[in-house]
Amino acid sequence: MRRPYQMLFPLLSLFIVRVDVTDLFPLVLRVKVLRVIDADTVDVRSGSRTLRVRLLKLDAPEKGQPFLDGNGDAGRVAENCAKAVISRARSYQLKLVKQDVYGRFLGELEDVSLRLIQRGCSGIYPYTEFSSLREKFEFLRALSKARRERVGLWNFGGYRQPMLWRKSSKQTARRRYRQSGRRPKTYPLVRRSSHMED
């Protein structure tokens, strides 16, 4: 015969386990695109809920990031290119995979990622995990063709990988700050007056 605690323990463990939204991934939703933030991030609506989704497999230039020749704004060109590809009039099937540290959901919006690469709106994120070798080569062929035909961003000569650009722009800003001779503001210590000690 089972003892009472042997029967209660499995029941209590059900209440101890915490269920999170991320436990439901991958989650498939029907959504409408509300707004294109940049070439790899969109706001979508599913029912009454609005989500910010970072499209998987894409690595688009940041707003303000110049092209390789130092001219223009690659981020704005990529954003306008993405707006031309992503239709706000139709609904898409969104597959949410996980949530990142910034609170954005990471997901795939039907075949949008591949179409953005084919149109030259974005490159491939270097740490992308593809579901198969076939999918990986499909994306690599699309990127290679866009570069060869000088479509979208590649018409302007391409752009530096955003992660490297952010790192170098931070270092440049620090170097300029040090060369300017300015010192950070220092605030005098607040001393306790005699009436504060009472």
Image (cartoon, rainbow, N blue to C red):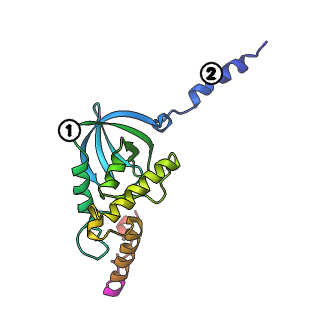
Q: Residue at the location (67% across, 24% down)?
A: 9
Q: Which mark is residue 21?
A: none
Task: Say which of marks 2 and 1 sits in front.
Answer: 1
Q: Amino acid at mark 2?
A: Leu
Q: Main secondary structure of the magenta part?
A: loop
Mark 2 surroundings: few (<14), some (14-19) or many (≥20) residues within 10 A = few
For the N terminus, give its image quadrant: top right
Question: What residue is shown with label 2?
Answer: 11
**Circle 1: residue type:** Ala
Judging depth in this view, the residue of 108 and 41 nearest the camera is 108
Crowdedness near tag 1: few (<14), some (14–19) or many (≥20) residues, C-alpha within 10 Å: few
Residue 115, percent across and down?
Answer: 32, 49
Q: Is residue 167 magenta?
A: no
Residue 179 is covered by the magenta coloring = yes
Q: Residue 16, relative to residue 139: is it above or below?
A: above
Q: Residue visible at 35% across and 73% down?
A: 169
At a point 36% along the width and 38% down the height, the residue shown is 94
The image shows residue 48 at horizontal and vertical percentages of 27, 32
Looking at the image, residue 7 sits to the left or right of residue 107; the answer is right
- Separation of residues labelled 2 and 1 (CA atoms): 48 Å
Q: Name the quadrant containing residue 87.
A: top left
| Residue 186 visible within the image | no
Quick check: 23 left or right of 93?
right
Query: Over which residues does the magenta segment extend?
Result: 178-185
Q: Earlier in the sequence, mark 2 or mark 1?
A: 2
Q: Name the quadrant of the C terminus.
A: bottom left
Q: Position of residue 2 (x, y in %)?
A: 76, 15
- Residue 119: image quadrant is bottom left
- Residue at 39% across / 61% down in the picture? 144
Between 3 and 141, the residue placed more toward the observer is: 141
Q: Residue 64 at x, y = what percent? A: 26, 67
Give the labeled residue for mark 1: 89
